[in-house]
Amino acid sequence: MGKKKDLPEWDDGRTIANMNAEGMPWYTPGDGKAAGRSVTDDAGSGDSADSHRFEKDKQELLTGKESLFFTAGALKAALLVVGVMCAAIIIAVALMLAVWNH
């Protein structure tokens, strides 16, 4: 009851978007409606399929070998981008020197 008195009179206490999401520091499992009445309470919730999909994805972890290949692939991609940028800068400087010395 003390919480209702702390709210401004224009605030009805409803939760527009529940911020209790996995990965957030304040996440508490099973506490979906603790913050108050939700705007979507009357519409029902179709989250059961989504939560099942996230639970399935959560169980699939990378092995050590897969993690190594993933890291090596990311490193190769980054080095490729850096190489292309360096080549572009070298070509640009060479063209500028050619125009300047012409």
Image (cartoon, rainbow, N blue to C red):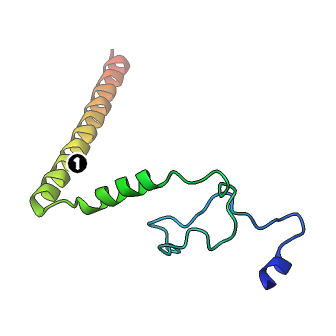
Q: Is residue 71 left or right of residue 96?
A: left
Name the quadrant containing residue 80.
top left
Residue at the farthest right position: 9
Of residue 33 and residue 43, the one placed in the foreground of this image is 43
Q: Is residue 30 left or right of residue 33?
A: left
| 21 w.r.t. 6: above or below | above
Residue at 36 percent across and 23 percent down: it is 96
Residue at the farthest bottom position: 2
Percent across and percent down for residue 31 are 54, 73
- Quadrant showing the N terminus: bottom right
Residue at 70 percent across and 66 percent down: it is 37
Q: Is residue 100 left or right of residue 65?
A: right
Of residue 17 and residue 75, the one placed in the foreground of this image is 17
Question: How many numbered circles are shown?
Answer: 1
Residue at the farthest top position: 102
The type of residue carrying mark 1 is Ala
- Quadrant showing the C terminus: top left
Rate crowding at label 1 as few (under 14), some (14 to 19) or many (20 or more) other CA atoms within 10 Å: few
Q: Secondary structure at mark 1?
A: helix
Percent across and percent down for residue 73 are 18, 47
| 85 w.r.t. 10: above or below | above
Residue at 28 percent across and 26 percent down: it is 91
Q: Which residue is mark 1?
A: 74
Percent across and percent down for residue 24 are 49, 68
Of residue 91 and residue 43, the one placed in the foreground of this image is 43
Percent across and percent down for residue 38 are 67, 61
Name the quadrant containing residue 51.
bottom left
Q: Is residue 70 left or right of residue 86?
A: left
Residue at 64 percent across and 50 percent down: it is 43
| 100 w.r.t. 16: above or below | above
